[in-house]
Amino acid sequence: MIPLRALMFPIQYQEVGEAFMRAKGLSSPTAAEWLATLGIDPTRGSDAPDVPPGFVHGEHFAALLRILSQHCSDDRAHSEQILECFPVSAHGPLGLLAIVATNMRECIDYAIQFGPLVMPAFGLRMEIIDHQVHLIFERRTDFGAFNNLITEITLGCYGQFKNYADTPRPDGDYYFRHQPDGVPMYIPGTPPRCIHYGCREDKLVFPEEFLDRPLIMTSRGSRNALESVLKEQVAVLAPQQPFTHKVRQLIQRDVHAGLPSELASVAQRLELSSRTLSRRLQEEHNTFAQLNAQIRIEHAKAQLLHTNKPVSQIAVEAGFNEVGSFSRAFKRVYDKTPSEMRASPQTIQAS
């Protein structure tokens, strides 16, 4: 787990707090008063010298969650009440970039690539199992008493992107590892039967065909401008591995299509020589073999959890010649054997 104070959140999230207070009929502090309430010097932006302008660290964001939760009523899920004041535009350039993408596949790719800029509390990856897309969220820090709240808010925020796709829009299913804190969460437009608690993963699931749905606000010019802004933010906030991201995309597409990933084949698709591809990965402290193994082990985990395929078949699809070596490699990553990972807890639906 990453220390909460080491994560950076956009300072504009305090605007969500202002909108929330107004919606509750409470006196809304000024922007400067909000920052002071969170323990932030309005003139400096943060009490930590390593926090760049425009961001606050995770402890300040946790303070915002605490204040908002204190003013939530108990007749509805707290996350539901906060999400009503959390529009896509609150995520700044990433929120706008996502909704002007060409289609949902590109929208999700932007979310994976730039998501750490707005919601660094979670890692995000996509798996496709039996023609269903699984957007899997892996928590990277500890919010203590607010872990469940931040999880529901995060999945709810990402779920908003589907509202900008061309019709028809699938319901989609929300899966949470935790049990509901009081009243189960309700998401407008999503039937209660599609919200599940007590699951093995925090994730969104929807039909694969939805990936090709065009977005109703697509704009090439806006995409180019917003992507440039986000790349500048990444350069300031955290190291990025743009070439590694491109290679990961191609390997993942091979994995989802049930195809092997060869260095020469991926290099050809990128219009590079194998040697150049290897060199550029090394510049970002990666190798093709490491990426290929990591992605296939991640996909193997998804197959174990969501299909009835024999472990031996999953091992072969992950590129292993025998189950023993697959099991050892899998346990090194997840500290569980494939059989232990497959153990399934009860899933509870919201009612």
Image (spheres, rainbow, N blue to C red):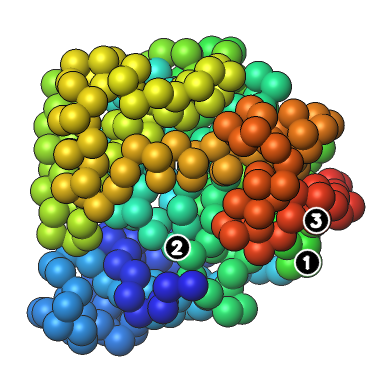
At x 10%, y 79%, the residue is: 43
User: 264 or 345, which is in the foreground?
Assistant: 264
Of the two numbered discs 1 and 3 in the rendering, the one whose residue sits closer to the viewer: 3
Horizontal side, residue 5 vs residue 335: left or right: left
Residue under numbered circle 1 = 182
Q: Amino acid at mark 3?
A: Glu
Tell me the element at label 1.
loop
Residue under numbered circle 3 = 340
Q: Amino acid at mark 1?
A: Gly
Tell me the element at label 2.
loop
Q: CA distance from mark 2 to mark 3?
A: 27 Å
Q: Does 164 sit above or below residue 186?
A: above
Horizontal side, residue 324 vs residue 12: left or right: right
Around disc 1, counting alpha carbons within 10 Å, would you say few (fewer than 14), some (14 to 19), or many (20 or more)?
Answer: few
Q: Does 138 sit above or below residue 314?
A: below
Residue 330's x, y, as percent? 63, 51
User: 101 or 237, which is in the foreground?
Assistant: 237
First-in-chain label (2 vs 1): 2
The answer to whether one can see residue 276 in this image is yes
Horizontal side, residue 258 vs residue 101: left or right: right
User: 315 or 154, which is in the foreground?
Assistant: 315
Residue 110's x, y, as percent? 33, 35
First-in-chain label (1 vs 3): 1
Q: CA distance from mark 2 to mark 1?
A: 23 Å
Residue 171: name its quadrant: top right
